[in-house]
Amino acid sequence: MQIETKDFFFFFAKGPDVTTYVENGIADIGVVGGDIIIEHQPDVYNLFPLPFGQCRMALATKKDYQWPDQKKRIASTFTNITKTYFKEKGESVDIIKLEGSVELAPILGLADAIVDIVETGNTLKENGLVIEDEFLAFSARLIANRSSLKIKREQLVPVIERFKEGAKQR
């Protein structure tokens, strides 16, 4: 979907793609989940949080799961976040990269547990999984291309300020 106004052109894209478009100057500003910022570390200005898209990262397993004695296998879309999480806990794990239906990995025996983004936890419950640990709370973020913010400052600052005012009102 695309929307064009006198001064601006808007388009919708998937989270990781938003950071790519903004980082490469195709888009001057973008709205993206904080999880994407943490996972991909794009070279953009991470301006401020927005009052929607609140989520958290969680480690989940099957109910009453007995962890194996050998190295744990963890499935996740968020491999960098997962690696950092277990490194901080002093644990060495095998990380299995999945792009969707991560919650199936423990059910089908691909992994011992998952690290995934959670909003309500309903999907985990529906699949017989329980949260072992929650970490990294985040929301949507407003980001900007570094060059655009300098070159198009006069045009962008009023838009950014409107986002900021809107965020304060919620």
Image (spheres, grey):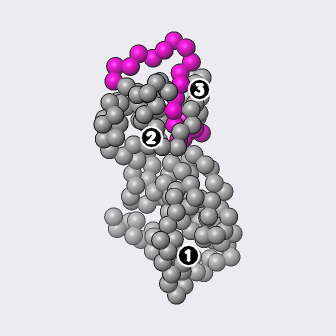
Secondary structure beneath dot 2 equals loop
Q: Nearer the viewer, residue 134 or 12?
A: 12
Q: Nearer the viewer, residue 163 or 124?
A: 124
> Quadrant of the rendered structure where residue 85 is?
top right
Across and down, in percent, residue 91 comes to: 57, 22
Q: Which residue is denoted by mark 2 in the rendering?
A: 101
Reply above or below: 27 against 89: below
- Of callouts 1 and 2, which one flags the residue occurring earlier in the amino acid sequence? 2
Residue 158 appears in the figure: no
Q: Residue at x 32, y 44 (%)?
A: 120
Secondary structure beneath dot 1 equals helix
Across and down, in percent, residue 49 comes to: 46, 58
- Of callouts 3 and 1, which one flags the residue occurring earlier in the amino acid sequence? 3
- Of callouts 3 and 2, which one flags the residue occurring earlier in the amino acid sequence? 3
> Quick check: marks 1 and 2 in contact, CB under 8 Å?
no
Q: Which residue is denoted by mark 3 in the rendering?
A: 94
Q: Amino acid at mark 1?
A: Val
> Quadrant of the rendered structure where residue 168 is?
bottom left
Question: Mark 1 or 2, which is nearer the eye?
Answer: 2
Q: Residue at x 64, y 70 (%)?
A: 26
Q: Which residue is denoted by mark 1 in the rendering?
A: 157
Instruction: Classify mark 2: residues with Cα within 10 Å, few (<14), some (14-19) or many (20+).
Output: few
Instruction: Classify mark 3: residues with Cα within 10 Å, few (<14), some (14-19) or many (20+).
Output: few
Reply above or below: 122 against 19: above
Q: Residue at x 33, y 24 (%)?
A: 63
- Which stretch appears magenta? 63-82
Q: Amino acid at mark 2?
A: Ser
Please say whether residue 74 is one of the residues in the magenta stretch.
yes
Residue at the extreme bottom of the image, as rendered: 6
Give the Cα separation between the discs numbered 1 and 2: 39 Å
